[in-house]
Image: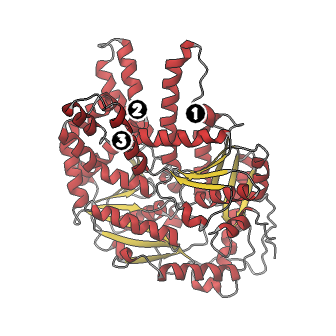
Amino acid sequence: MHFLDQAPRFLFFTGKGGVGKTSLACATALHLVAQGRRVLLVSTDPASNVGQVFGIAIGNHITPVPEVPGLAALEIDPQAAAQGYRDRIVGPVRGVLPDAVVKDIEEQLSGACTTEIAAFDEFTALLTDTALHAQYEHILFDTAPTGHTIRLLQLPGAWSGFLEAGKGDASCLGPLAGLEKQRERYQAAVEALADPAHTRLVLVARAQPATLREAARTHAELAAIGLRQQCLVVNGVLPLAEAEHDPLAAAVCRRERAALAALPEGLRALPLDQVPLKPFNLVGIDALRQLLDAAPATAGEAPGESLPLLQAPSLSRLVDEIAQDGHGLVMVMGKGGVGKTTLAAAVAVELAHRGHEVHLTTSDPAAHLQETLAGSLEHLSVSRIDPHEVTERYRQQVLASKGAGLDAAGRALLEEDLRSPCTEEIAVFQAFSRVIREAGRKFVVMDTAPTGHTLLLLDATGAYHRDIVRQMGDKGLHFTTPMMQLQDPKQTKVLIATLAETTPVLEAANLQADLRRAGIEPWAWVVNNSVAAARVTSPLLRQRARNELREIEAVAAHHAARHAVVPLLSEEPVGVPRLLQLAGAALSTTGA
């Protein structure tokens, strides 16, 4: 494998959600340890599942993996990091300043901006800690989905530049109090990331146009900030032998070959590795050790063994219930790579096809709604909450209002403050709030960012809600916050999207628990791209279908109040006709 040749100290695994970054990072860690190296595996994903893959509890501290001497792991827990960060700032003033002032500081540090800074602070420490580097020869980073990762890798430079200016008002007072102390560390982090002798980026993709386009965008954006030492790994490629007697497998192979033949120009110069699809779930050390094997694994199906019949509701059945209300907010959430964009588009297209007014939007920086729709439909409008666009619009609004009465020096200070990375958090939240208000008169279907990023947005929503309650509650005034709308099942229906695999189902269950803690009850689960819901004869796909049946049963019996299963289709669900087909796709009988 090219990406393993002369591996440097830092390896970053990045890419669109669901392409297998965690599995590949874990397998690489095992490979390096088998060569006698000491390895630390770090997850920077707010929705990390490294512990689930290894079958141990890890958390926000370096934890040895008992079955693998020489390997330790760390999950940077944004909430735990944020709490520790708050304690470091607030602790010294507690009992010194008046309680009201301390409470105000705590509230100031309760938002997603503080969470991001705290996690980033831990990340930069790993890049610059010489004692840690003496203990581990390699530090592998299993990163959050692309948009969040680019943001993380840009932050050392962004915060260094902001601190160089020495500006900032009360909106960033708490975070800056900690950041100012770390100026030298951030500069060292920038240098480590840009040094090809120390850092290599592994762009992980699937043999699908959308993930390869995302990899190309990531390649360009990271190269532009000096991270040019990159490799491309295409994961989960279906072996050609599986296509011989299976029409669905043959269609998948044709799609994958066409996607690789049309590799985006920016990726063609990169070293390329292909990892074959395996018939088993990549959970546990034995399975992970087989991932990097060049030879495809055999399915091992007994002769004449048949698959049980799968009976499950279609997505159209869920849309029937959604449509009865005539309007409302539908949010599609889940782990990256489970097909949230496609499912959100299918729900929106089906509702519009029935004559309802529908606004389809996304808060995912890496979403491709227009590419998925590939056309238009009466009653359907489409938008995207672009972080760069909404942030610039917010800056201009603040300069026009708050800056109108300032002199030149005051306006210059305000402009500098608005270049703080905290500004994006506020701008995206405001755009999100504007969109969901439309759900009182039409259907708003929202394709959300992958789990961790969405939870940070909900954290900002909760912080705003608490602030409004504190300001308005004592005055006896009626008010409705975005969080109250999300918590009202009459106004909001949350669909949790997943795949019928162990890790995505565990991830979806964790998301459901997080939502419930926020007072949001998920309305339904959708199991997407199910092989068990399609007619297959390929031995490898039949074994994967057998594994899926256990997971679908767990969803139906233990997790979901209601659910639907969407089969893997022979054609990519792109364009209005195929999205309508996907929404109403009947399940094939899988016996025989």
User: In front: mark 1 or mark 2?
Assistant: 1
Spatial separation of the CA atoms under disc 1 and disc 3: 26 Å
Tell whether 76 sits left or right of 558: left
- State yes or no: discs 1 and 2 in contact (Cβ < 8 Å): no
SS for dot 1: helix
Which of the two discs, 1 and 2, labels the residue nearer the N terminus?
Answer: 2
Contact between marks 2 and 3 (CB within 8 A): the answer is: no
Q: What mark, if any, has residue 287 been given in the picture?
A: none
Residue ID for mark 2: 83
What's under tag 1, amino acid-wise?
Met
* Quarter holding residue 41: bottom left
Disc marking residue 483: 1
Q: Nearer the viewer, residue 345 or 6?
A: 345
At numbered mark 2, what does the secondary structure look like: helix, strand or loop?
helix
Q: Residue furthest bottom?
A: 244
Neighbour class for label 2 at 10 Å: few (<14), some, many (≥20)?
A: some
In front of the other: label 2 or label 3? 3
**Residue 374, how many percent across, how many down?**
59, 68
**How many residues crowd around disc 1 within 10 Å: few (fewer than 14), some, or many (20 or more)?**
many
Instruction: Give amino acid for label 3.
Output: Gln
Residue 257 position within the rendered picture, expressed as x and y whole percent measured from the top left? 53, 82
Residue labelled with disc 3:
396
The foreground one among 470 and 193 is 470
